[in-house]
Image (cartoon, rainbow, N blue to C red):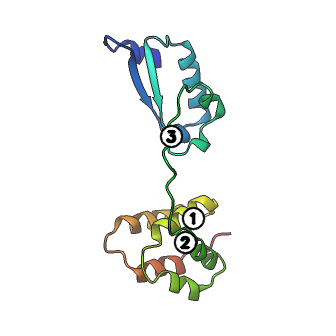
Amino acid sequence: MLSVLLSSLTTTGPAWAIIGPMDQASSGAFDLLLKSLEELDSARYRFALWAKDIAFVPSTVLSRCLERYIPATYEDLLWEDAMSLYDAWVSADLATVSKLTETVDLLPSFVHVLASQGSNLDLNFWGRLRRAMQDRTFDADEFFTLLAGARFPG
């Protein structure tokens, strides 16, 4: 399939294809991609594979990459406060949740913590968090209400 697509391109040099996000592909997609990459003429075709998190790219794919560019890891400066908020939320300590949600500054970091903890939250909660992050008028009271009204994970 990939060879059919690429063979339709006309270029004087190698044809390039950018493929990703590799960290979100299914195992079937990896198998198909690897088979295609191995069968194609490397002199005619070049591939740039990209991923948001290289840790989720299978080693079978990584072993076929000639070069890797990994930018500096994003450092979440509010991680520790967001972890404190998460711990208070999980233990239903609403006084601490209230204190830590006095501003909405922790919302992006809190979502990062939730994702890293593999929290077993329903899709409605994730949807409300997504909308909250997109809403420029979302305030601290709404942040507290969102957390206080949600089912605690666990």
The furthest residue to the front: 72
Q: Which class describes the residues within 10 Å of circle 2: few (<14), some (14-19), or many (20+)?
A: many
Q: Are marks 1 and 2 in contact (CB under 8 Å)?
A: yes
Three-letter amino acid code at the position of disc 3: Ala
Q: Position of residue 117 (x, y in %)?
A: 63, 62
Location of mark 3 (residue): 51
Q: Earlier in the sequence, mark 3 or mark 2?
A: 3
Between marks 1 and 2, how big is the CA–CA gap? 7 Å
Residue at 50%, 66% in the rendered image: 77
- Check whether the beta carbons of the residues at disc 1 and disc 3 lie within 8 A of each other: no
Snapshot quadrant of residue 14: top left
Q: Residue at x 43, y 73 (%)?
A: 105
Q: Nearer the viewer, residue 126 or 71?
A: 71
Tally the numbered discs.
Answer: 3
Q: Position of residue 133 (x, y in %)?
A: 40, 66
Task: State the image quarter where residue 57 is shown.
Answer: top right
Q: Disc 1 marks which residue? A: 113
The residue tagged with tag 3: helix, strand or loop? Answer: loop
Q: Amino acid at mark 2?
A: Ala
Residue at image coords 50%, 40%: 51
Packing grade of label 3 (10 A; few <14, some 14-19, many >=20) is some
User: Which of marks 3 and 1 precedes in the sequence?
Assistant: 3
Residue in the picture at 52% in, 37% down: 22
Which dot marks residue 82?
Answer: 2
Left or right of 58? Residue 14 is left
